[in-house]
Amino acid sequence: MIGILDLQGGVLEHLDHLQRLGIPARRVKVATELKGLKGLILPGGESTCLRRLLAMEKMDDAIRAAAKRGLKLWGTCAGAILLADEIVGETGILKLMEITVERNAYGSQLDSFNCLVSIAELAPEPLPLVFIRAPVIVRTGKSVRTLLEVKGKIAAAESDAALVTTFHPELSPTLAFHAYFAHKCGVRPTTKTMALAPDWSMTSWTRLAKV
Amino acid sequence: MTDKKTDRFTLNVQLAQMLKGGVIMDVTDVAQARIAEDAGAVAVMALERVPSDIRKQGGVARMSDPDMIEKIKAAVSIPVMAKARIGHMVEAQILEALKIDYIDESEVLTPADEECHIDKMQFSIPFVCGARNLGEALRRIAEGAAMIRTKGEAGTGNVVEAVRHTRTMNREIRQLQNMPMEEVVPFCKNNGLPYELALKVRELGRLPVVNFAAGGLATPADAALLMQLGCDGVFVGSGIFKSDNPAKRAKAIVQATTYFNDPKKLLKFSKGLGEAMPGIEISTIPENERLANRGW
């Protein structure tokens, strides 16, 4: 089972992707819901807001304790900021990965962009990636290796315990990163693993939020 | 629509998706913006007067002084929104030049055009617009809004209109889903729905973009109520900084929006907040002074 931290942000988009791969998944709002998880996704959202919500109900301590017990973590965009040891200009939040991140490092929303990248390790075909007011990783420590650079900046990195991507695979048909993270957690997708979801659309998440 | 414009619109819709489960707060100066950020707001709406003061003072309400918006922008790291008058494309151009994060084409300001809203597809930055029903929401999306909010009745501290607008939209979505195909065209005609978007809503069972509650929310329980009714997040305007203890109330509303389905936690968040803003009974507001009636 993989959890998605459900305090604020792009939770349903990740849930949609995990379900497409047949990976058991649940939303995590309180510490008791971390029990039995192999991995936890920290989604995109507003990192300042997430920082406050993590502290208010002591979810930060609970996640740190679970990480010590072997829970694997994946932060996308704001989630990467939550995991970083250091944030340029402010103190770190969960400090569970040896990286320094800089917020909004590509610029404002007008500088948000899509691109296609090839990552041989993940998939034979090029993968569409979405960068929205994205941070960049400006330093990696000894325990961290770089997975991907985009526009000369580190956009994905990994340690034994955690994965960070400054972009949003959950906002594109790209399933490869979710499959990769599941593998890292020792969870096997039950459906045939595809790098791209053929029938994904930008409104796919809405099936999980009907009125 | 060119491909570049489609891409930009998609990125703006997706940016708004990242606000889900969050609270957007009205602020009128740097000190308030810092309190909002510190309480865990996902964004702030920078404006000169909160709706309850606009309502009291009357007169024409316009876009805020860009200087004031800029100061707020410099003081916080969270996104900053600002309001343009309905149909006032030049106010919107100025706000875009200022590089704020979102424009709210808002009925809280005095409308500049009594027929047309802004052609939002001409802009690169995202717009949020108010709606009372499905027709209004889809017309705004057709014009290029990347995000919808209910109108509610701003500045009243009375949640009843936001509830009415949410229930109306939800009811119309369910009707659209359950009717036979031959009834869709007359339904669109009678309710002012753009046809293609109506088909999309029929397929999805909700709006294709994020929909927040706004207008009259004043307590943690109000925020949780609108979340339980299916909204994706909430705006709180006068409700925070017109109350006794803004910092505490702001934080409680943020928590209530996240844990909207947990009555025990809601009980905890609701305690000891001091007086909420004084409310106004909607029936005491003359029809021509109701802000929700602005917009077409």
Image (cartoon, rainbow, N blue to C red):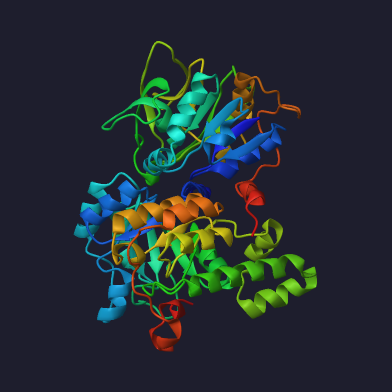
Say left or right for B150 vs B196: left
Q: Give the position of the N terminus of chain A as an image quadrant.
A: top right
Q: Quadrant of residue A98?
A: top left
Q: Is residue B290 above or below residue A190?
A: below
In-image side of A89 versus A185 (left or right): left
Total marks shown come to 0
Q: Nearer the viewer, residue B284 or A90?
A: B284
Q: Is residue B229 above or below residue B41?
A: below
**Residue A47 image point, x, y percent:** 40, 39
Question: Is residue A74 shown to the viewer in this render?
Answer: yes
Residue A157: x and y, percent?
A: 47, 21
Name the quarter where the C terminus of chain A is drawn.
Answer: bottom right
Question: Looking at the image, which residue is at 55% across and 74% down?
Answer: B164
The answer to which of A27 and B102 lies nearer the viewer is A27
Residue B7, position as x, y percentages in the image: 51, 47
Residue B103 picture location, percent across and down: 38, 60
Quarter occupied by residue B198:
bottom right
Residue that lies at the very extreme toward the top in this rendered image? A142
Vertical placement of residue A54 versus A120, above or below: below
Query: Quadrant of residue B108 in the image?
Result: bottom left
Q: Residue at x 42, y 63 (%)?
A: B219
Q: Residue A77: in sight, yes or no?
A: no
Residue at the spot 52% in from the left edge and 43% down from the top edge? A10
Of residues B229 and A164, the one drawn nearer to the viewer in this rendering: B229
Left or right of A208 in this view: B61:
left
